[in-house]
Image (cartoon, rainbow, N blue to C red):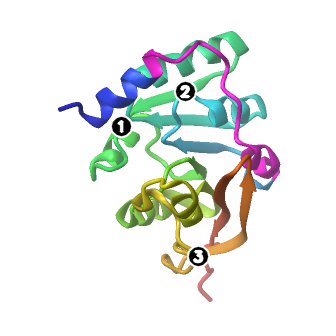
Amino acid sequence: MESEQQKWDRRYRDKALLLPTPQRFIEQSAAQLMPGTVLDLASGDGANSLYLARKGFDVIAADISSEALERLNYFAVMLGVEIRTVQLDVDQPDWVEMLNEVEPGVINNMVMTWFKPWLPLWHQMAERLAPEGNILLSTYNIQQHHKHGFNADYCLRPAEYTGVVPSLSTRYSASVVIDDSYTDEYIFQKQAVQQQL
C-alpha cells in the first residue's frame, strides 16, 4: 500500500515544472504578518513560500514530500531567493523535533493552506508561535464536502479553531467561494506576553 509520502512524491514527480501560484489569501494578507520568520507548513512545492521569500521574509518550508521540496528548491534558485526546507510529516508528533534542526527558536508567523491541522498539531503550532505572531489558515470548508463530495474529515467546520487555544485570538475570518471551491480563511494572532507588575 502506498504511503502518504509516496503518494505526494508521485503527484509532484508527475507535475509539470511550472512556477506555482500563491493562494490569493496569502497575497492579500502578507502585509498583516510580523517581520521575520514564516513557517509554511504543508508547503508543497512552494507557492506561498516563494511569494513570501520574495517579500523579504525568512521562510522555512516544511512538507512530507521530498519531491515537492526539490521542486521548491529549484524554483527558489530560479527566482534568486533563499528558503530553508525540512522534510517532515506534520501528522507525526516528532515534527517539532525535526523543525528544531532547521529553526530551534520561536516562529514569527505560520501559514497553512489546503491542509486542515489536527487539534494536537494546532496546539503545537501555537506553542512555537512568537507572542504577537500570526497564523494564516485557509482551506476547504464543509460546503466543499456538501457540494463536491470532498472528504469531510479534511474540511473546516464554522469557527472550528476559534477559541480552541486561549492564547490565539481571531483577527479575521471569512468564508469565500472562488471558482466553485468553498474555503474558509483565518488570521489568528498570539497574545503578547503580559508584563508582571
Query: Which amino acid, by three-letter code, is at mark 2?
Result: Asp
Decide whether residue 186 is among the magenta residues: no
C-alpha gap between disc 1 and disc 2: 14 Å
User: Which quadrant holds residue 141?
Assistant: bottom right
Query: Nearest the camera: 3 or 124?
Result: 3
User: SS for tag 1?
Assistant: loop
Count residues near mark 2 (Cα–Cα under 10 Å), then give few for <14, some for 14-19, many for 20+: many
The quadrant of the rendering that contains the C terminus is: bottom right
Q: Is residue 98 above or below residue 195?
A: above
Nearer mark to the viewer, of 1 and 2: 2
Please state the extent of the stretch shown in magenta in the rendering: 12-31
User: SS for tag 2?
Assistant: loop
Query: Nearest the camera: 133 or 183?
Result: 183
Q: Earlier in the sequence, mark 1 or mark 3?
A: 1
Q: Position of residue 83 (x, y in %)?
A: 59, 26
View extreme (left): residue: 1
C-alpha gap between disc 1 and disc 3: 28 Å
Q: Is residue 59 above or below residue 190?
A: above
Q: Position of residue 112 (x, y in %)?
A: 56, 49
Residue drawn where x is 40% and y is 41% of the image: 99
Q: Is residue 23 left or right of residue 55?
A: left
Q: Is residue 165 left or right of residue 33?
A: left
Q: Is residue 194 left or right of residue 10?
A: right
**Residue 88, disc:** 1
**Residue 45, disc:** 2
Q: Is residue 94 left or right of residue 196?
A: left
C-alpha gap between disc 2 and disc 3: 28 Å
Query: Which amino acid, by three-letter code, is at mark 3?
Result: Ala
Count residues near mark 3 (Cα–Cα under 10 Å), then give few for <14, some for 14-19, many for 20+: few
Query: Which amino acid, by three-letter code, is at mark 1?
Result: Leu
Cβ–Cβ under 8 Å for marks 2 and 3? no
Label 3: which residue? 159
